[in-house]
Amino acid sequence: MQAFESSAAEIDLEPVAAPAPPLGRAIVITSGKGGVGKTTTTANVGAALAAAGKRVVLVDADVGLRNLDIVLGLESRVKYHLLDVLEEKVTLDEALVRDKRSENLYLLAAAQTREKEDVVTAQMKALIERLRERFEFVLIDCPAGIEMGFKNAVAGAGHAIVVCTPEVSAVRDADRVVGLLPGDWRPELIINRLRPHLVRKGKMLSVEDVNAILRLPLLGVIADEPGVIIATNKGEPLALDAASETGAAYRAIAAKLAGEEVAAPAVKASPGGGFLSRLGTLFGGRS
Amino acid sequence: MSGRRIVITSGKGGVGKTTTTANLGAALAKRGHKVILVDTDIGLRNLDLVLGVEKRIVFDLVEVVEGRCQLRQALIRDKRFESLSLLPAAQTREKEAVSEAQMARVVEDLGALADFVIIDCPAGIEHGFRSAIAGAREAIVVTTPEVSAIRDADRVVGKLTAAGLPLRLIVNRVRPEMVKSGDMMTVEDVCEILQSELLGVIPDDEEIIDTTNRGEPVVLDETSRLALIFDKIARRLDGEIVPFTNFNAPTLFGRLFTLWKAG
């Protein structure tokens, strides 16, 4: 019996039985509110991780309203998508689009003419698991809202990055989303589109104001600048622009995610206007 | 009375649906119309915040649908504009709590109480979108001059057209200096791509961030250029012919057109 088992094991195993590499990290980028910068964040953090030598796949979970391909400038290379893989019409390798600039970066696009309800949560989970076997980072770009698309995007992940802008409505939605994520997660926060001059004038919430409500570990702060719109329209992530300050901020976020010690982001922002009291009453109910 | 029922939608989130709903509603109310705003973003409501009435919510849309209160009990009257009211969304429920048929019924009932029922749609094209458009008779699509927003708007225009809803466009957050330098699409480009009629153009203005955080629609400030712009949009909606502010210099966004061809 023992002999039989060992011979079976010999047949099943690779000739050199190297230990299986550790599974990659699956991280969902989410926000609740739309238009706060999830897709831009996914593209830039992914590009920065890949530029630092990590193997990265970006998954667009926004079925029906995909945009990650545009932000990466890969829209003309997308042939197959997530649902083609889930429905076994093509293999994973056929659907993965390699980035133009980096050998380490891949995109799995969303279907554009299908519905979010077409994705089966269990299949999505299994797909993310397969991607984790092949990539060190699986970044999942979540759709806006908290409907089915959100649930599917979160299903296979083990960690979350919450993107929030310094606006009362975005903070409220982010707070709601944090409450819907698995209770044992410790989501990290990126505050996007900060305008320091408005914070100084008391016309925008400060980083401290936002995090007084959300109370999440701060992964980074990204300033509002027209360069982001230009880069998105061109399909070239700013993270790859060595001269861009915003690019540097994304690279710092990537380094932190990769486990490097990075100094806390330098944000000069005195406390904001009279919003904090408003936020306080608004969120008083959440323990 | 049978008021107009207009849904404000976009596909992409964060392009300004809620801000537009609040300010357009306030501008119409200022012009003497009776206006009811409906927040259909169940679970992620924000229209109450933008209007600054968040502390006055007692009942919500879901409670109306479930028959736990009268429709009139759930309406919150704005203190600054007598003829403006809000039907807030529920915050701790799911979008599926209201079906398309139930939403259509509520909107129809509201039509009997107002000249304009303006429905603030959630982002996306899931169940929340389908129920938000269910009771509407016309649509306003809000977009920004960005490739991703326009692609999403294109999807929504297709869905609205399939549903038989006439629609017009509001192009939001236009930065004239970026249009001039060729770094942003022109309003003409946007209308051309979406093959839709223009209702209004709103420049990017930091003032809106502050007024939204404070819960004071910018329309309240008579000296604001945005107040003037929302008034113009309200007048166009009302059937007046009001000339557009022009941000010219056409640009070629070749990527966009190949994108559309690719479907």
Image: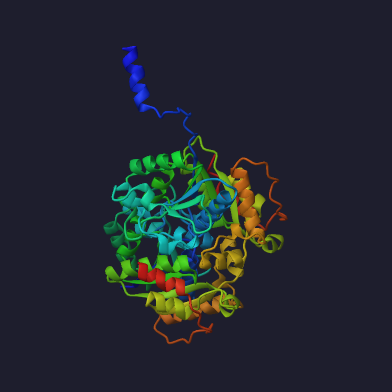
Residue A180 place in picture, x, y as percent: 46, 43
Outermost front residue: A15
Residue B53 visible in rendering: no
Q: Is residue A120 left or right of residue B235?
A: left
Question: In the image shown, does B158 or B55 lie closer to the viewer?
Answer: B158
Q: Position of residue B3 (x, y in %)?
A: 34, 73
Which quadrant: the N terminus of chain B?
bottom left
A219 lies left or right of B126: right
The residue at 42%/57% (across/down) is: B41
Name the residue located 31 percent from the left edge and 16 percent from the top edge: A4
Q: Is residue B225 visible?
A: yes
- Percent position (x, y) of residue B169? 42, 75
Judge from the rendering whether residue A220 lies leftward or rightward of residue A59; answer left or right: right
- Residue A98 coordinates in the image, percent (x, y): 46, 54
Q: Quadrant of the C terminus of chain B?
A: bottom left
The image quadrant of residue A269 is bottom right
B146 or A148, which is in the foreground? B146
